[in-house]
Amino acid sequence: MSAEAADREAATSSRPCTPPQTCWFEFLLEESLLEKHLRKPCPDPAPVQLIVQFLEQASKPSVNEQNQVQPPPDNKRNRILKLLALKVAAHLKWDLDVLEKSLSVPVLNMLLNELLCISKVPPGTKHVDMDLATLPPTTAMALLLYNRWAIRTIVQSSFPVRQAKPGPPQLSVMNQMQQEKELTENILKVIKEQASDSILVLEAALKLNKDLYVHTMRTLDLLAMEPGMVNGETESSTVGLKIRTEEMQCQVCYDLGAAYFQQGSTNAAAYENAREKFFRTKELIAEIGSLSLHCTIDEKRLAGYCQACDVLVPSSDSTSQQLTPYSQVHICLRSGSYQEVIKIFIEDNLVFSLPVQFRQSVLRQLLQKAQQGNEVLDEVCFKICACNTVHDILGGRTISIQFNQLFLKPNKEKIDFLLEVCSRSINLEKASDSLKENMAAFLKNVCLGLEDLQYVFMISSHELFITLLKDEERKLLVDQMRKRSPRVNLCIKPVTSFYDIPASASVNIGQLEHQLILSVDPWRIRQILIELHGMTSERQFWTVSNKWEIPSVYSTVILGIKDTLTKDLVYILMAKGLHCSTVKDFPHAKQLFAACLELVTEFSPKLRQVMLNEMLLLDIHTHEAGMGHSGERPPSDLISRVRGYLEMRLPDIPLRQVIAEECVAFMLNWRENEYLTLQVPAFLLQSNPYVKLGQLLAATCKELPGPKESRRTAKDLWEVIVQICSVSSQHKRGSDGRVSLIKQRDSTLGIMYRSELLSFIKKLREPLVLTIILSLFVKLHNVREDIVNDITAEHISIWPSSIPNNKSVFCSPALLSPGRSCMF
C-alpha cells in the first residue's frame, strides 16, 4: 500500500460515521429485527416511513413474460410485508392522529383495508349491515378505526390547505404526484358516498357496553401462524390492547361531532347533533381524567367547537350568565342588540377574556355596514372603537387609526362616553402602576388633541383624571392648552403684538397644504390631514398637487371611498409612494406603502390586494437596484411572491400591466426557466401575453444546447415576434384621387403591441435572452426588410450596455449566415 493510500485510509477510519440506515428487505430476512428496531430511542427509518416502504414494496405491480403489467401477486413475500406494516401500526397503538399526520390518504387507506382483511371482515360486505355487538372485539375495533378514519378524512378534506412549495421539477416526481392526487380524489369520492353508512356504524358503536380490543404485534403474529399453531387463542379471545368503553365512545363522539359540524353548512339541523356530541365528549373526558392511555382529543379545538355550537345552536335551558362573552356577542350581533355588545366589551376591559382579533373583527363588521349606508351604526362604531382603544391602551398597544378618524369631530356625548369607558375599565384599587400610567398618558394625549378648551376642562375635571395625574401635571397640561388657544389673554399681555393676532383660517390651511406637499412621513401626512379636515369639511385635499397621480385603474376604487379623510389619506399615500418609487427613493416608498396597506386592510380587501401588488413591484425594484445589481440572487420568498402574483385569479382586482411585465422580466433575468416552461398554469398563457412571451423565451434558452432540429419553441417564438412587429396597412384615397398606403406602426396583429415589446425588452438584462431577441431582430432585418426597415435601429438603440448593440457581433457564420436561419 502506498503512503498516500495509507493516509487516506487513516483519515477515513478516524472520521466518525453515521450508522447505516436499515433497509426494508432486512426485516424480511430476520424476524426479530423489527421489534429491536422499534425499541430504539430514535429509529431510522422512523415507524411511519417503514409503513410506507413495506406497503410500497407489497403493492408493486409485476410484469409477465409478454411485458404486460400485472397486479401485485398474492405471494408469501407480499403477505409478510403487509403484516410488517400492520405490526408497525400496532406499535404506534393505531393512533389516527399520528398516522394521518405522516401517511398519505392512499397509504392509510391500504393499511386500514389490510387491517379489515386480517380481522376477518368479509370483503364486499357493507359495514352498516354488520352487528358490532356480536362481532369479535378486535373485528369490531377494526371496523371502528376504518370508519372513524373515513369521516375524519372527509372533514379534513373540507378545510383549505396551503400548497407546499414545489421543489425543482422532475418529470418522474411530477408524474408520481399526479398519480397520488388522482388516487386520493378517487378514494375521497368513495368514502364520501359511504359517509352516511360510516356515521351509522359509529352511532351504533356508542350503544356498545363492552370493552374492545385492538391488535398488537403479538396478536398479529398469532393470526399469521397456521391454524394448528395458535394454541387455542383466536381473534375472538380477549387478547390485544384493551380499549375501555369510555375511551372508545369519547373518540367516536368527537369524530361524529366534527362530521355533523361540517354538514351544518348545508343542513342547519346537523349543528344540533354536533353540539350534543361535543358536549358529550367533554363529559367523557371529565370521567376518564388522567387515566386515559389511548384517548387523545385536541381539547383546545374541542373548546372552539363547543363555543361555535353555543352560538349556532344556543341551548334552550342555558341563561345569559352561563354563556361565554364570545357567545353572547354573537347572539347580540345577530339580534341587533348593539348596546349589549358595548356593555360586554366594557366589562371585558377588566378581565381580558375576548381576543383582540375578535374585538377588531366585530368593529370591522360594523364599519362595513355603516359604510353601506346604515347611519344608525355610526354612533355604535365610535362606542365599540372607544372600548377597543381603551382595551389596547391598557394592554400596552398603540391607538388605532379608526379611533382618530371617529374622534375627529368630538362632542360632549363622545367625551362623556369615553370618560365612562375609561372609569369602568380600570379598578384603581387593584390596578398596577403600569396600567395607571398607560391610562393617564392616554387621557393627556386626548386633551392635547382637542382644540376646544371646554372639552379639555371636561376631562381635566373628571375624577379619574384627578386621581391618575398629580397636581403639577394637571396644571402644566392646562397651561399648555391655554397657550395653544388662539384667543388673546389681555390680562397677561396688555399690549397686543403682531404675533399675538391669530392667523386666518385660509393662511393656516395654506401652510398645512404646503407641508402636506413636502412631507413623505406617513404619520405626519395623517396628522396634517386630520388638522385640515378639522378646519374645513368642504375641501378635497387629494387635489392639492397636480403631481399626485395614481393609475386610472386604481383611482376609481379610491375615489369611491365614502369617508373623505380616508379617501384623501389613501390617495396621497399611494401617489407619494409611487412617486418615491419612480425616483428610486425606495425606503420612503416602502414606508408610505406600508402605512397605506395598514389603513386599507381594515375596510377594503380589494385595495389591500392592490397595495400588496404594489409592494411586490417595489421589492422587485429594490432588489434589482441593490443586491441584484451586484449579481446576488433574490431571496426565495420574493420569487414565491412573484409566482403567486402571476398565478393570482382574484376577480374585480384592478391590475397594472407593468407589474405583470416586471414579474416576467424578473423571472427571465434570474433564469427561472423551469417555472416558466413547466410549472406556469395553462390559463396564464391564454390571458397574459407577457407570460406567453416569457415562456417562449425561457423554453428557447433551454433548447439552445440541443440539436437545431429539435428547436420547435424557437420557431414559435419567431412567429410571435413576426406578428408583433408586422405593420398593418390601410389604403386611403387622397384629395387628388390617388390611392396611398398608410402603415400603422403599432398594430394589433400579435399578442401585444410593438411598443409594449420594446418596453419589455428594456427590463431584460439576462445576456442569453437578449442575445436571442437580438438575433431575432437581425433575422427580421435580413429576411423581412418590409417589416422592420423602419424599426431595427430603434430596437437596437434600446439595448442595455451588457449586450453590444452592434449586430455584427451576432452575425458569425456559426450563428447567422446568408441563406441560414440561425437558431430560428
Image: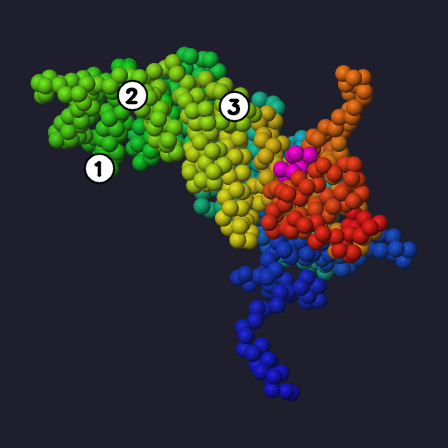
> Which tag, 3 or 1, sits closer to the chain's start?
1
Tell me if residue 756 is in the magenta stretch.
yes
**Disc 1 versus disc 2: distance between alpha carbons?**
41 Å
Q: Nearer the viewer, mark 3 or mark 1?
A: 3
Q: Amino acid at mark 3?
A: Ser
Which mark identifies residue 508? 2
**Residue tagged 1:** 433
Residue under the image location 57 percent in, 27 percent down: 654
**Residue tagged 3:** 555
Q: Is the residue 768 above or below the residue 549 in the image?
A: below
In the rendering, at what x and y percent does residue 557 appear? 52, 22
Count of marks overlaid on the render = 3
In the rendering, at what x and y percent does residue 5 appear? 62, 83
Q: Amino acid at mark 1?
A: Asp
> Which tag, 1 or 2, sits closer to the chain's start?
1
Residue under the image location 45 percent in, 43 percent down: 289
Kindly check if marks 3 and 2 are in contact, taking CB atoms under 8 A apart as contact.
no
Answer with left or right where residue 110 lies relative to residue 420. Answer: right
Indicate the colouring scheme. rainbow
> Which tag, 3 or 2, sits closer to the chain's start?
2
* Magenta-tinted stretch: 754-760
Q: Secondary structure at mark 3?
A: helix
Residue under the image location 72 percent in, 58 percent down: 80
Which of 641 and 528 lies nearest the eye of the viewer? Answer: 528
Which of 144 and 96 lies nearest the eye of the viewer? Answer: 96
Q: Is the residue 612 above or below the residue 76 in the image?
A: above
**Disc 3 versus disc 1: distance between alpha carbons?**
48 Å
Which mark identifies residue 208? none
Q: Nearer the viewer, mark 3 or mark 2?
A: 2
Residue under the image location 20 percent in, 16 percent down: 454
Could one spot residue 181 in this view of the protein?
no
Quarter of the picture holding the N terminus: bottom right
